[in-house]
Image (cartoon, grey):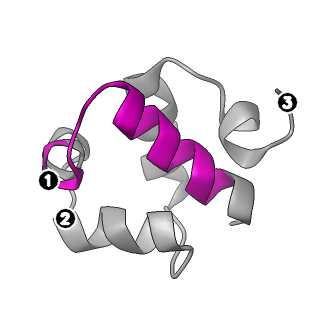
């Protein structure tokens, strides 16, 4: 994924005052996975991307940087 996804994921998480562990638990992934997403070291699967969008009530386009 791109840099925008990493930044938006981190911003959304911090806006809701969630730690990486809390977000990982909500998305049923390990804490290290959330960290890797935020660092841009790996990309979420499509199903996890959908879960992230639903969790934060944003569109996948927003997460991907295709809309503001």
Q: Residues within 10 Å of mark 3 (few under 14, many from 20)?
A: few
- In the rendering, at what x and y percent does residue 59 appear? 65, 26
Q: CA distance from mark 2 to mark 1?
A: 5 Å
Look at mark 2 in the image and give the residue it sits on: 31
Magenta-drawn stretch contains 12: yes
Picture residue at 44% right of the left edge, 38% below the top: 52
52 and 13: which one is in front? 13
Residue 68 - label: none
Sequence-wise, the earlier of marks 2 and 1 is: 1
Asked if the residue at tag 1 contacts the one at tag 2, i.e. Cβ–Cβ closer than 8 Å, the answer is: yes
Q: Secondary structure at mark 1?
A: helix
Q: Are marks 3 and 2 in contact (CB under 8 Å)?
A: no
- The total of numbered circles placed on residues is 3
The magenta stretch spans which residues?
5-22
Residue 68: image quadrant is top right
**Mark 2: few, some, or many residues within 10 Å (few <14, many ≥20)?**
some
Q: CA distance from mark 3 to mark 2?
A: 27 Å
Residue occupying the point 49% across, 17% down: 57
| Dot placed on the residue nearer the N-terminal end, 1 or 3 | 1
Rendered view: 23 above or below 21: above
Label 1 sits on residue:
21
Residue 18: horizontal and vertical position, in percent? 23, 36
Tell whether label 3 touches label 1 (CB within 8 Å): no
Q: Which quadrant would residue 36 be assigned to in this image?
A: bottom left
């Amino acid at each position: 994924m791109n840099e925008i996804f990493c930044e938006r994921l981190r911003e959304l998480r911090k806006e809701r005052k969630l730690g990486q562990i809390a977000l990982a638990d909500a998305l049923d992934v390990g804490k290290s996975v959330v960290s890797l997403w935020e660092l841009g070291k790996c990309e979420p699967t499509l199903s996890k991307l959908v879960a992230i969008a639903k969790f934060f009530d944003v569109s996948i386009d927003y997460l991907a940087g295709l809309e503001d």
